[in-house]
Amino acid sequence: QVQLVESGGGLVQAGGSLRLSCAASGRAFSTYAMGWFRQAPGKEREFVALISWSGGRTHYADSVVGRFTISRDNGKNTVYLQTNNLKPEDTGVYYCAATRSWTGSPPAPSRYEYWGQGTQVTVSS
């Protein structure tokens, strides 16, 4: 069992930065690949970034390449999402999630076993 709690969201002007954190409980954290998703009002949840259990492999949505960086610290049971040069279209609730199903392409949301409650990111223009 893994419980996930996100933090670090807030209101920021376009061009600004936020560092999101996802703290996990449970000793199995280091065995999971961890992903970040986001959901804007009236839109479906979309993939943002993914990191392997070791941190040696990452994958990003095209819309955030070069602006967002995912990382993890297994000693602290925490995964991070550094968001830079934020745009109004980055606004949404950001969720972290855990999966053991990453082989080739990033897994679909249904393949993630655990989800956090989300943290709100609002980017003003």
Image (spheres, rainbow, N blue to C red):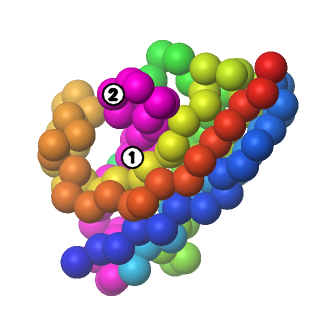
103 and 83: which is toward the camera: 83
- Residue 44 is tagged as 2
Secondary structure beneath label 1: strand
49 and 8: which is toward the camera: 8
Q: Which residues are magenta?
A: 26-50
Task: Tell me which amino acid carries mark 1.
Answer: Gly
- Residue 35 is tagged as 1
Q: Is residue 84 above or below residue 95?
A: above
Is 99 positioned to the left or the right of 95 in the image?
A: left
Answer whether residue 83 is visible to the viewer in this image: yes
Q: Is residue 36 above or below residue 125?
A: below
Q: Is residue 56 above or below residue 87?
A: below
Location of the N terminus (image quadrant): bottom left
Residue 4, given in percent of the width and then of the height, sits at 41, 68
Q: Within the image, what quadrant is residue 99 found in?
A: bottom left
Residue 36 among those drawn in magenta: yes
Residue visible at 39% across and 46% down? 35
Residue visible at 70% across and 22% down? 87
Residue visible at 61% across and 20% down? 89
Foreground label between 2 and 1: 2
Q: Within the image, what quadrant is residue 27 found in?
A: bottom left
Residue 116, given in percent of the width and then of the height, sits at 39, 61
Residue 56, given in percent of the width and then of the height, sits at 44, 47
Secondary structure beneath label 2: loop
Q: How many residues crowd around disc 2 within 10 Å: few (fewer than 14), some, or many (20 or more)?
A: few
Q: How many residues crowd around disc 1 within 10 Å: few (fewer than 14), some, or many (20 or more)?
A: many
21 and 125: which is toward the camera: 125
Answer whether residue 49 is visible to the viewer in this image: no
Task: Tell me which amino acid carries mark 2.
Answer: Glu
